[in-house]
Image (spheres, rainbow, N blue to C red):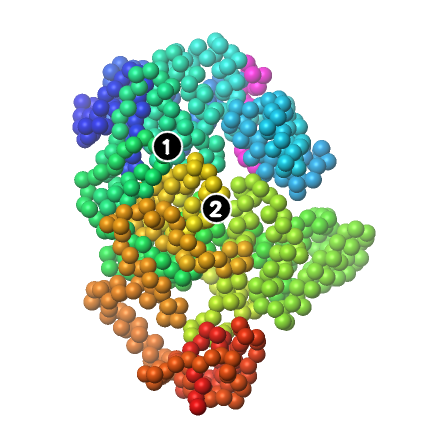
Amino acid sequence: MMQDYLKGLNEKQREAVEHIDGALMIVAGAGSGKTKVLTTRIAHLMHQGVDAFNILALTFTNKAASEMKERVEKILGNTEARNLYIGTFHSVFARILRAEANKLGYPNNFTIYDTDDAKGVIKGIINEMNLDDKHYKPAYVYNRISAAKNGLIGPKVYKQDSFIQQEDARSSRPLLGDIYETYAARCFRNGAMDFDDLLFKMYELLTRFPEVLAKYQHRFQYIMIDEYQDTNVAQYQIIKLLGDVHENICVVGDDAQSIYSFRGATVQNILQFEEDYENVKVVKLEQNYRSTQSILNVANQVISNNKKQIPKSLWTDNTEGEKIVLVRTLTDNDEGRFVADSITEMKLRNHYPNKSFAILYRTNAQSRSFEESLRRMNIPYKLYGGISFYQRKEIKDFLAYLRIIVNPQDEENIKRIINYPARGIGKTSIERLLIAANEHQKPFWEMLHHPEVAGLRGSASNEIEKFVVMIRSFQVMLEKQNAYDVAFAVGKHTGLVQDLYNDKSVEGLARYENVQELLNSIKEFTETPDEEGELRDKSLGSYLQQITLLTDADVENEEDQDAVKLMTIHAAKGLEFPCVYAVGLEENLFPNSMSLYDREDLEEERRLFYVAITRAKERLWVTYANSRYRFGNLVQNEPSRFIEEIPEAHLDRTFTGISNRATGSVNAFGNRYAQQPAERASSLKKIAEKMQQQAPPAHVPAADFKADNPMEMEVGMQVEHIKFGFGKILSVEGGANNRIATIEFGGGHGNKKIMLNFAKIRIVR
């Protein structure tokens, strides 16, 4: 019933709801019920006689807006909530702009360009200006223009600002201002606005036409803004203008969760709110309904290290809960294996469904090791905030090169990359070649050797010949080089890696990092010995087979919600999970290397870690790897400085010991496995017994077994391997650091290639 709508609110929530007139800042800590407060406050305003048409509520997602409207309607028990102006900034402003469009010279039915539309227009302008679209990349130009609009910088000001012009000159893109100017004129001529225009033009409407400003100032007597810490310059200025008459501005947010500066958001908006309005009432929602006290203690301590913040301390009536588990692994692949094994263990011990788990990382490129490990364990998962690692365009492009090197008959992959990066082989030429191949019933690859049959001459024919020679040169490498050497050559000589490196946009940098991560995985594949130093086939063909088996597995049902969630921390904001793995807590990764030399950037990284911590309801793991492949090199990592900020009393360091690769993931859990219930122990015993039945008898070395110097081992010697037993060296190759021996073992083990530097072998004297 309507009279019961205030029931269920705690003291602070009720204080915020019942405040009617004047500026109000609700500092809503994570999991403190801010949506409930916002919707109840709207209902309370209407219950006190405020007309729905006089209330404006702005959110950042359509989902949040719909939820708020539904909740208000449920509280009121009538349809008045439908008259509220509740929506995202963009949707509400688009509604106003359509009503007032003629004042700005736009038709009321103006088109709204999405990101791809906008980039398409920009690409056309770049071509018209005869500029190199590999240097003036449409994505980069679009992001530059977007940032300018969100900062309320129009094309004229952009071209006149000396600092901006110097920036463009340093990037060797002095004509960005001209492109921006032409783009703005083209959109206007087309009767179109892009997403950023919905803010930029709204500000222009309010500042150029005082009568319009007065109209909406008097209409919106009560304004509420959700997630205020995520507002940018344009949103801030528009809100200031609209609320200037009544000053009944209510903002809800948490400075500790301001993590979107790369989108133009500024934490300063919420930090300075008390200075913007007189007699501001501040209500802090510090009671958390989501997490255990142990998790909150960690979150409070970590965020307290930020200088710029609104002090608060989260608390809960929930249980104290488990300590936060700190995990150190040898490599990033071990990190992936640990998480997959840990999820399996938690499901068995505590009967958690898959959807209870979330793996949160700093960058999308980190998903690979977790995807692979989850697939190996047959654990269903869903990737959020991006497509699967191996389905990303840049990865598919790179793998297409590798696949046609191994199998040049692969027509689809040839078509995918024959003109990427651009080499002057246009669509018309490709179509002619395909037609000729079909007419002569020849493979497409063979037709590339004879472009004249398709009527191609001149530059197109020359470029096709160069492409064929390049691919054949890579094929020659297959005979002597391992998978990484071939892949590195592909990345270098095709220009693919350089093309991605040249794109300095946020998306371009992400694509470049993803390809580097692919190369890292190939590097590890070729350099990592298997159990006890055994060296198996490290060729490109073997690698591709492994990847194909991983990526061609049954795709998880998108509608099946019982899946582990993988996402960046940015994508996880606003979500919650019983069990959270915050992974990759290493210096230069998290915090990101670009943030280490600026306090504001570093504090945003810390806020990002705070967001990761507060996603967890019951259990939290923090993991990091001692080493990680980056740019083809194995890099040693220091643990993140944020780990040092976690209170020792709330840390479980059981898993900070390095696991032994030779004994697999069980050792990664240390003594924890010994503490498992009977059914888990029984299951492990059965698996061990089955493996023993299938494997050759285990070799038991002498108690005084001691490995000998690899450089002393020669052909013909009798040796003893700690696992495979006694054998004879048939051949030895390689230098001091990579001696590889082929050894004939008895006991059913047969011939094996062994990396002597890694293996434990003694000479039988």
Residue holding disc 2: 593
- Mark 1, Cα crowd under 10 Å, few <14 / some 14-19 / many 20+, is some
Percent coordinates x, y for residue 369 in the rendering: 44, 57
Residue at (49% x, 20% y) in the render: 202
Residue at (70% x, 60% y) in the render: 470
Q: Quick check: 703 above or below 388?
A: below
Q: Quick check: 101 above or below 442?
A: above
Question: Which is nearer the N-term, disc 2 or disc 1?
Answer: 1
Split into 4 quadrants, where in the image is the N terminus?
top left
143 left or right of 601 in image: right
Q: Quick check: 371 above or below 274?
A: below
Q: Quick check: 101 above or below 657?
A: above
Percent coordinates x, y for residue 526 in the rendering: 53, 67
119 part of magenta stretch: yes
Residue at (48% x, 9% y) in the render: 211
- Magenta-tinted stretch: 102-120
Look at the image and tell me whether residue 646 can be seen.
yes
Element at label 2: helix
Residue at (30% x, 21% y) in the render: 24
Which mark, by number, is residue 308? 1
359 left or right of 628 in image: left
- Mark 2, Cα crowd under 10 Å, few <14 / some 14-19 / many 20+, is few
Which mark, by number, is residue 569? none
Q: Label 1 is placed on what type of residue?
A: Lys
757 left or right of 43 in image: right
Nearer to us in this view, 268 or 618: 268
Q: Residue furthest top?
A: 211
102 left or right of 244 in image: right
